[in-house]
Image: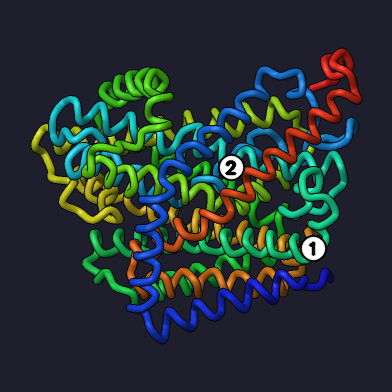
């Protein structure tokens, strides 16, 4: 059984302190996180936009570089999972609850509540709503995940390093990463991961609460959310006990099956032709406007800058906070893939699936409101999906029930994957952390999620995530430099001719 490292005790101590602080003085913690978040969003918004875009460009480069043929592993290593299962696992870990939560809520908000361009409720607002939703959930998001996963997989499986964030920094920081500096880096990674996963679990609990509230009149409050988290915690701890190849693998395939079923129901009963048209049009405008959106900071417009802080900066921080968790997990299941296959699959397949999802659920909600059938925008974000299904009688009820089951299975998968990854990071990079360590982290994830909900609901979740993302974004930048330095060195040693001859 792998023993816990010093990173386990330090990060656990910090998190326990925050949990106790949140329970004892919730108003203080809420005010503190809000003030820090406000400062970071206003002072470092430009930084988030630049670094996320640069990381995405680095990922895209390996689609055309001869270095893309290098394998994430030894030359004779074969992929551990089939391609469909691999894609299902990375998708479940990478988006999960967030896609279900925001699939309806974000497009309808951009259309009817707060537009990214200032135009609300008009035809142009429909086009803007989907274009910016695509931007937030497209290749930038997966570029953040992809670069962390790529760096970790390369150093772990090709160079035999431990599965730790700090181990990827040897080319730039040298042997100092094996001492105190490495422990500090790994502690930051653990804290960012716990906050990122806990935020997502909070969204899941709130949306399940919103669903049963809309359908059955159950109140929406912290007590109901506590019961939901408690039940799901027991379920994901059981899944964690079964291990990676059983629990997460099976649940990932269940997730994809339920997600496809839910998608088909909405696609068929919704405005199908409009969905196809808005999907096609929005992909075009997304590609056309991608450079401008990537660096859009609105320095002279206070209202638009507030929108960017509340949406784009929030998302970039969310993806960064989630990136050590998703990155380590995707790296773990991607052994034996070529860099080019990895980048293509991670950046484009989930993005296209996400675009279809938002066009279907967001487009259906927008058309219901645009045509005066239902005022979907009046509902809270966690109830918007169920309000859309509510317009379709019996089939809508079936869709709502499937949606709640899907949220629950995504909840279990995210938490299960999270306990595995944090277990790895706190047992010196072990690929088989002990069940005891995973159980402890599972309980801590749930406790952190509940405390953040208790101290200020979704806003407290968002504030804490943006704060946690800032220091880790610097580590991500160093990881990228380290990776480029190492892979170019390997490329020179192999010779470009040899690289071209390698099997993909």
Whether residue 402 is visible, yes or no, is no
Q: In the rendered structure, which disc, 1 or 2, sits on the residue that comes first in sequence?
A: 2
Crowding at mark 2 (Cα within 10 Å: few <14, some 14-19, many 20+): many
| Residue lying furthest bottom | 24
- Above or below, 240 against 83 in this view is below
What's the residue at 34%, 33% (across, down)? 132
- Tag 1 residue: 428
Which mark identifies residue 75?
none
Q: Is residue 76 left or right of residue 226?
A: right
Is residue 58 something that shows in the picture?
yes
Q: Are marks 1 and 2 in contact (CB under 8 Å)?
A: no
Q: Which residue is found at the position 38% from the left and 56% from the top?
A: 404
**Residue drawn at (63%, 34%) of the image:** 84
Residue position marked by numbered label 2 in the rendering = 145
Tell me what residue is drawn at x 33 percent, y 64 percent.
209
Report x, y in % for residue 385.
29, 48
Q: Is residue 451 above or below residue 311?
A: below
Q: Position of residue 374 (x, y in %)?
A: 13, 43
Locate the C terminus by quadrant. top right
- Say which element carries label 2: helix
Q: CA distance from mark 1 to mark 2?
A: 22 Å
Displayed quadrant of residue 172: top right
At which x and y percent is residue 301? 23, 39
Q: Secondary structure at mark 1?
A: loop
Give how far across and how far down residue 282 sits, in percent: 34, 23
């Amino acid at each position: 059984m792998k023993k816990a490292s010093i990173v386990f005790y330090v990060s656990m101590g910090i998190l326990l302190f925050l949990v106790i602080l949140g329970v004892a003085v919730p108003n203080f913690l809420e005010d503190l996180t809000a003030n820090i978040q406000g400062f970071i969003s206003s002072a470092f918004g430009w930084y988030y936009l630049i670094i996320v875009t640069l990381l995405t460009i680095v990922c895209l480069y390996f689609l055309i570089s001869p270095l893309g043929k290098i394998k994430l592993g030894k030359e004779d290593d074969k992929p551990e999972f089939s391609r469909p299962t691999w894609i299902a696992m990375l998708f479940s870990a990478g988006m999960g609850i967030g896609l279900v939560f925001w699939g309806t809520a974000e497009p309808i908000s951009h259309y009817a509540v707060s537009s990214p361009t200032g135009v609300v409720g008009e035809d142009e607002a429909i086009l803007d709503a989907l274009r910016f939703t695509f931007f937030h959930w497209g290749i930038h998001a997966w570029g953040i995940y992809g670069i962390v996963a790529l760096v970790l997989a390369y150093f772990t499986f090709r160079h035999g390093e431990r599965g730790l964030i700090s181990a990827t920094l040897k080319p730039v920081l040298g042997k100092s990463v094996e001492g105190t500096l490495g422990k500090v880096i790994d502690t930051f990674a653990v804290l960012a991961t716990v906050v990122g996963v806990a935020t997502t679990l909070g969204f899941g609990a709130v949306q399940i609460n919103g669903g049963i509230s809309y359908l059955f009149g159950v109140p929406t409050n912290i007590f109901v959310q506590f019961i939901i988290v408690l039940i799901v915690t027991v379920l994901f701890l059981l899944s964690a006990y079964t291990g990676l190849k059983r629990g997460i693998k099976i649940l990932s395939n269940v997730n994809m099956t339920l997600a496809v079923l839910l998608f088909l129901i909405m696609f068929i009963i919704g405005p199908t032709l409009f969905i196809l048209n808005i999907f096609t049009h929005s992909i075009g405008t997304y590609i056309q406007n991608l450079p401008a959106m990537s660096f859009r900071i609105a320095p002279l417009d206070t209202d638009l800058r507030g929108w960017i802080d509340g949406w784009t900066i929030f998302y970039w921080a969310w993806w960064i906070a989630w990136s050590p968790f998703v990155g380590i997990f995707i790296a773990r299941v991607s052994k034996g893939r070529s860099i080019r296959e990895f980048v293509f699959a991670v950046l484009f397949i989930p993005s296209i699936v996400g675009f279809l999802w938002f066009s279907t659920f967001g487009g259906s909600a927008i058309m219901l409101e645009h045509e005066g059938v239902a005022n979907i925008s009046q509902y809270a974000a966690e109830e918007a999906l169920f309000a859309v299904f509510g317009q379709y009688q019996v089939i809508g009820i079936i869709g709502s029930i499937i949606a709640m089951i899907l949220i629950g299975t995504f909840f279990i998968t995210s938490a299960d994957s999270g306990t595995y990854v944090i277990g790895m990071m706190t047992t010196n990079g072990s690929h088989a952390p002990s069940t005891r360590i995973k159980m402890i982290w599972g309980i801590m994830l749930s406790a952190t999620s509940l405390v953040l909900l208790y101290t200020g609901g979704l806003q407290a979740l968002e504030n804490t995530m943006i704060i946690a993302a800032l220091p880790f974004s610097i580590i991500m930048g160093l990881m990228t430099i380290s990776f480029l330095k190492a892979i170019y060195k390997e490329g020179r040693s192999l010779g470009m001719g040899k690289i071209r001859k390698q099997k993909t």
